[in-house]
Amino acid sequence: MMKKKKLYLVFFILFIFLSYGSNYGHAQEQNKQIIITIDGLTVEEFFNLSSLNLNKEIAYGLVSPYTKGRLGDLNQYITLGLGRRVDIGGNKSTEAFNADEIINEKRTSDIYFEQTGLKSSLENLCLLDFPDRFNKIRELSKVEHFGYLGSELKANNISRLIIGDTDLYDINNRYTPYLICDQNGLVDKGIMGDKIQRTESIGLAFYPHNYTVIKQKFLENKDKSELLILEFGDILKLEKTKNSFSEQRLLDLRKSLINQIDLSVKDIFENVNFANTRIIILVPNLSNTSKNPKGLFPIAISGKGIENSILVSATTQRTGIISNVDLAPSILNYYDIKIPSWMEGDNILTVNKNNPKTYLEKLNNKTNFIYEARPIILKMYIFIQIFIISIFSVLLIKKVVYSSLFLKLFVFSLIIPISLLWIAIFPVLNYFSFIINFIIISSIIMLICFVSAKLSRINILTFICLFSSFSILLDVFLGSKLMKLSVLGYCPIRGARFYGLGNEYMGILIGSLIMGLSLYLEKKKITKTKLLVTGVIFLICLLFIALPSLGTNVGGTMAAFVGFSIVLLRLANFPLNYKLLLSVGGSMVIVLILLFVYDIYLSPGQTSHIGKFADLVRNGDFISVIDIFIRKIAINIKLIRYSNWSILFFVSILSLIFALYKPFGFISKIYDSYPILSKGFIGVITASLIALIFNDSGIVAAATMMLFPINILLYVAQKKI
């Protein structure tokens, strides 16, 4: 009997030991994440932090800061936490407090209970403005997911802790709670305010952090929390109170605070187990002293699964640039939690790259110049186009005779867009080098066009049109590398598009290709072979515009399909009537369905925004679907009201109307003399209207699409007077 009791005792002890060991091992294997925010740094200051050199396995990147509202502060943090761009309205103040903090002689937990009817632990962080934020985001952005990240982490037993703040002398500025709060407006634990601040303020500006206490709190809690955020806000505090200090004192304080933060980051690196920990360091709000305070902000990731490399994501598909909406999906993915379809971002990945910091600094400088120069150069370009169209419309009405000077002006106006594409091969970082390189590129392109046209006996305008469309198709095939760095391309800071075929060059591609082929086929007999070859060229172009791995432009696909179809059918002498238009419209719907199916099922690992939209429909998230349509309509209305492109488009339409009536019978002469070209006009005009209606910045595509037909029409008109 005693032997049996001893045997049972041994088994019991063994069971307890194994259970403890198992739980201990599980705890040791639990993935942990540490997120460090250092608002107020410049990109250069971030990359110069010595703490980032402690671990060789570190990946760097730049983050697109685009949100639906104003850039900066709280709006950025909520977008980071939602994985979806939102607008929080004008109120940037925060009301995040430790549950045991006293506000107006009331404990925060009591105020929170009065507002929500929910109880909170005294360790919790309570967002007293959560109901207001939730309702405002739902109203302005049609999003009901605020707090989703925190709730998912909580549901998966991942505890959340925040250490630090950006409090001023008498103002609560606590941004990180809005990144990981749950849908009740709570964070598991927070250590903020006077718990981690020095007792002596810097002037009457703010109380700086006590970095010794922060280190102590970090060491005490690093093994108790699976997600730990450190908000080093002293640099941003200093910037917000800069008028309280002399210029030299401001510089000295900035240098001292950066050094203290750098040492604190070193302490963190030296006291974590990188086998199961990932550290993310980022600057959600750049310094006002940056070259571009609204520009791309830096990020570095080190630890589990990271090698010395550079960051990428499917959202941007650009080496070194990710989006702010990628952070939340990456946090979820790290814990093997499913990423919801309504999140606009994707998991952050890495690729190998030599000297990543040098590469990113050069990329940032280029991007900042493009961001600065883009509105200025585009305004000049649009003014030139409006001037040329207006002048030649007046000359047309007055029946001024054609001259070679007109031809040169038309040629110059048509090569500007493609010159702005090819100039991206040069490392342009200032206006002087831009002007010099633009002159060189334009001269080379003009020389190529004139010489080639003369040798091949092809009309010079035909050659320019086809050269333009071929250049764009070649760039798209090679990954749109030139377009990404062109002032007529798309800007990652604005974040409307990161890859594929932008709307500006989409319009130019469709307009130049249709007009180029129409000019080439003019005076030629239209045979079945010519129709087949033209159809194949149009099909290739359509695929370049549509495929997720190439152009991935839905609005462009619709416009191109309609325009190409009408031109082909008119070349085959089908009458232009409502039956033809209905057939083309129905076929367009079928093409779109096939495109969505291809993106979802036949393009694994390359799902674009087309596939994401289809996922929303498939998952029944119609609120997000409606939000997308509302957002696209709002963008188009805004661009039509305020963009210079709308002026160019309406000037083009007005010139076309003048051409119909002045001089009398002119259009019928053009139709009789250039029947193929006239069919091209109809195709482009129809395509531009489709782009205007169905594209989120349709006025831009419509305006650039009309450039080639309107200039060619005016050129032909001068010859026919």
Image: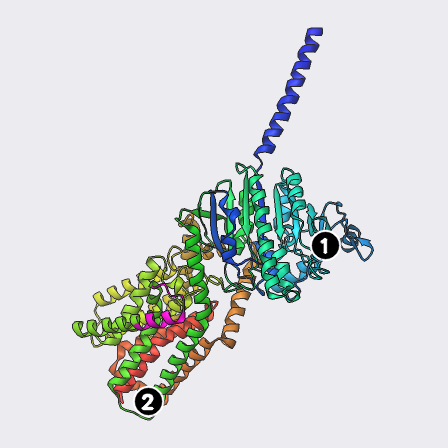
Residue at the spot 66% in from the left edge and 39% down from the top edge: 220
Q: Give the residue type at disc 2.
A: Leu
Along the viewing direction, whichever of 484 and 499 lies nearer the viewer: 484
Left or right, 57 with respect to 440, comes to: right
| Main secondary structure of the magenta stretch | helix
Q: Is residue 643 above or below residue 604?
A: below
Judge the density around disc 2: few (<14), some (14-19), many (≥20) Cα neighbours within 10 Å: many
Q: Is residue 540 above or below residue 314?
A: below
Whole-percent x and y of residue 239?
61, 62
The image quadrant where one finds the N terminus is: top right
Pointer 2 or 1: first along the chain: 1
Residue 577 is at least partly visible in this image? no
Please say whether residue 429 is one of the residues in the magenta stretch: yes
Query: Which callout, 2 or 1, points to the residue nearer the camera?
Result: 1
Judge the density around disc 1: few (<14), some (14-19), many (≥20) Cα neighbours within 10 Å: few
Along the viewing direction, whichever of 616 and 394 lies nearer the viewer: 394
Left or right, 649 with respect to 444, comes to: right
Q: Give the residue type at disc 1.
A: Glu
Whole-percent x and y of residue 649?
42, 78
Whole-percent x and y of residue 355?
40, 50
Whole-percent x and y of residue 672?
26, 83
Residue at the spot 39% in from the left edge and 73% down from the top edge: 704
The image quadrant where one finds the C terminus is: bottom left
Q: Which residues are magenta?
A: 426-439
Give the numbered dot on residue 461.
none
Farthest-out residue, front = 248
- The residue that mark 1 highlights is 200
Give the numbered dot on residue 396.
2
Left or right, 637 with respect to 154, comes to: left
Along the viewing direction, whichever of 633 and 704 lies nearer the viewer: 704
